[in-house]
Image: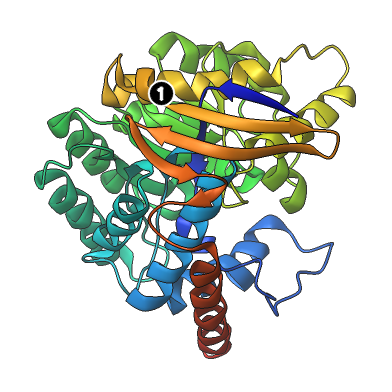
Amino acid sequence: MTLLEKAGAVNAHTHLYSGLVPFDLPFQIPPTLPFPDILKTLWWRLDRALTPDILSAAARYYVGQALLYGTTTLVDHHESPTMIAGSLDILASACADLGIRAVLCYGVTERNFGREEAQAGLAECQRFLQTRPTGKIRGAVGVHAGFTVSDQTLTDAGNLARQFQVPVHIHAAEDTCDVDDARRRGDAGLLARFIRTRALSEGSILAHGVHLTNDEVRECDRLGMWLVNNPRSNENNRVGYAAALAKSRRVALGTDGFPSDMEAEKTCLAEQIKGADGIVVNPEVRLAAGRQIVRQIFGEKVLLSDRVIMRESPEGREVTAVEIGGERVVENGSLVYATWQSLVADAKRAAHVLWARMEDVQ
């Protein structure tokens, strides 16, 4: 048996609200269903069925699991259209209680209730940012995706982010529907729309980028924007491999709601690269890029006191201890501030309620 010390992993794009999905999700998605219909059939029903208790259980389970995987920072993108006000506080409490570092935002959209919904989402981002979250919690301005918001909402989001000097966190070109929407609006492409509306602040985070062009990715790099590759999610949703991301030096690794097992994410990326002729990508470099995002938001020295201790044996590797900001949050393979068994039990109860509530959401 050997003990190894490594840097804490960063999940640069995820969704804590999806934490209950592993608990017998009863909704089966046909393998031929287009991506927009996957959103409408599953994810946009799930987020409308959330309650404070369900969201808390989902977040606490997801955070606890992330810590046990050796992930020390989560960059989250949240949506709960029928429960917007105060939702970021629920996530912040879950993260703070268990000791993880997190960047939180509400993903503004107009897909359910139009501009009124967007304004409520922006208000939640602004309220949270005005609390001046400190310590291990920071805020950002979220936008769901270009195809679910108007130009005015994109402009408002960019202005709010610049006001507070924080990034905009947005899904970008995950599917061709996002690109097609921008072109229908008269723009050459999605990035052109973002630039025209001044939607992006310095250091903004664009998740996915599967259908950005090589030139768009190069321009994102030139502008100092971050792109986040989410291999397992892209594979699961059948949206394609983000080959153009190889044109940027600023690409991090996320899970888009999959568990924060960043080793599994690296493995999936390595497999995808094998099938992409001429693409040279180092999965470890993309994982390390997430730490650069953390330094941008929290400061240069914040990661110096993070440590993950792993036990290596013939059976594999196991995280035995995690320190974040000098605070021990995993000890002897167990969470310090909660028991894994209690998180699982609460998640199972909440999942049962969530699946029932989703049946009534159309």
Report the label total: 1
Q: Is residue 352 above or below residue 268?
A: below
Q: Amino acid at mark 1?
A: Ile
Identity of the residue drawn at 28% across and 38% down? 136
The residue lying toward the viewer, choosing from 207 and 184, is: 207
The residue lying toward the viewer, choosing from 197 and 311, is: 311
The residue lying toward the viewer, choosing from 298 and 236, is: 298
Residue 201: image location, x then y, percent: 28, 26
On the image, which quarter does residue 179 sit in? top right
Residue 212: image location, x then y, percent: 61, 28
Q: Is residue 231 left or right of residue 286?
A: right
Q: Is residue 280 above or below residue 358?
A: above
Identity of the residue drawn at 81% across and 69% down? 30
Q: Residues within 10 Å of mark 1 (few under 14, many from 20)?
A: many
Which quadrant would the N terminus be assigned to in this image? top right
Identity of the residue drawn at 56% across and 66% down? 43
Residue topped by disc 1: 293
Which quadrant would the C terminus be assigned to in this image? bottom right
Q: Is residue 36 above or below residue 102?
A: below
Q: Is residue 84 left or right of residue 72?
A: left
Q: Can the viewer see residue 186?
A: no
> Is label 1 in a helix, a strand or a loop?
helix
Q: Is residue 350 above or below residue 277?
A: below
